[in-house]
Amino acid sequence: MQIEGNNANANDAIMLDKDGYVSETNATNIFLVKKGCVLTPHADYCLPGITRATIMELVVKEKFELMERRISLSEFHAADEVSCCFSIESIYMEYF
C-alpha cells in the first residue's frame, strides 16, 4: 500500500484488512463520522494506540455515539467526516 501511495504522490494511504475493510493508514488510526455517529475500525487489524484509546474515551465522555466495527471502503468514501490521529510529542489530528 505504501508503494501505491508513493506512486500517487500521497502523504498517507488507506490500509485495508485481509477482507478488504478499512483498518488504518500507513501511519495513523482512522475515525469516521456518519450521521453523528463516530466510527472506528476494530483493533484486530490496526494498532490499538494510546491516542486512539484517548480519543475513544473522549468521544464517550462527550456523549457521542461510538461504534468500533468493520468499515467498508464505500462507507469510508460516504462518510460525513474522516479524521486520522497519531501522537509523537503531542496529539495531532488530520481532517479530510
Image (cartoon, helix red, strand yellow):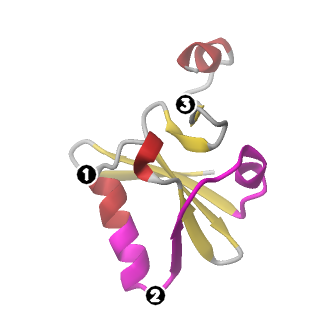
Q: Residues within 10 Å of mark 2 (few under 14, many from 20)?
A: few
Can you tell which of label 1 and label 2 is closer to the viewer?
2
**Gap between marks 3 and 1 measured at Cα:** 19 Å
SS for tag 2?
A: loop
Residue in view at x 64 percent, y 16 percent: 4
State which tag comes first along the sequence, 2 or 3: 3
Please, what is the three-letter code of the amino acid marked with disc 2? Lys
| Mark nearer the N terminus (1 vs 2) | 2
Q: Which mark is residue 63?
A: 2
Pointer 3 or 1: first along the chain: 3
Can you name the residue that lies furthest to the left here? 89
Quarter where residue 36 is shown: bottom right
Please state if 88 lies on the left or on the right of 61 as rendered: left
SS at badge 1: loop
Q: Residues within 10 Å of mark 1 (few under 14, many from 20)?
A: few
Q: How many marks are shown on the rendered structure?
A: 3
Residue, disc 3: 12
What is the quadrant of residue 34 in the picture?
A: bottom right
Looking at the image, residue 39 lies above or below residue 65: above
Name the residue: 72% across, 59% down.
79
In this rendering, which labeled residue sits more in front, label 3 or label 1?
3
Residue at image position (43%, 75%) is: 59
Where 95 sits versus 55, above or below? above
In the displayed structure, does residue 75 sit left or right of residue 70?
right
Magenta range is 56-80
Q: Residues within 10 Å of mark 3 (few under 14, many from 20)?
A: some
Q: Is residue 57 above or below residue 10?
A: below
Cα separation between marks 2 and 3: 30 Å
Percent across and percent down for residue 85 are 42, 50
Amino acid type of the residue tagged 1 in the rendering: Ser
How far apart are labels 1 and 2 at the CA level? 24 Å
Q: Which mark is residue 90?
A: 1
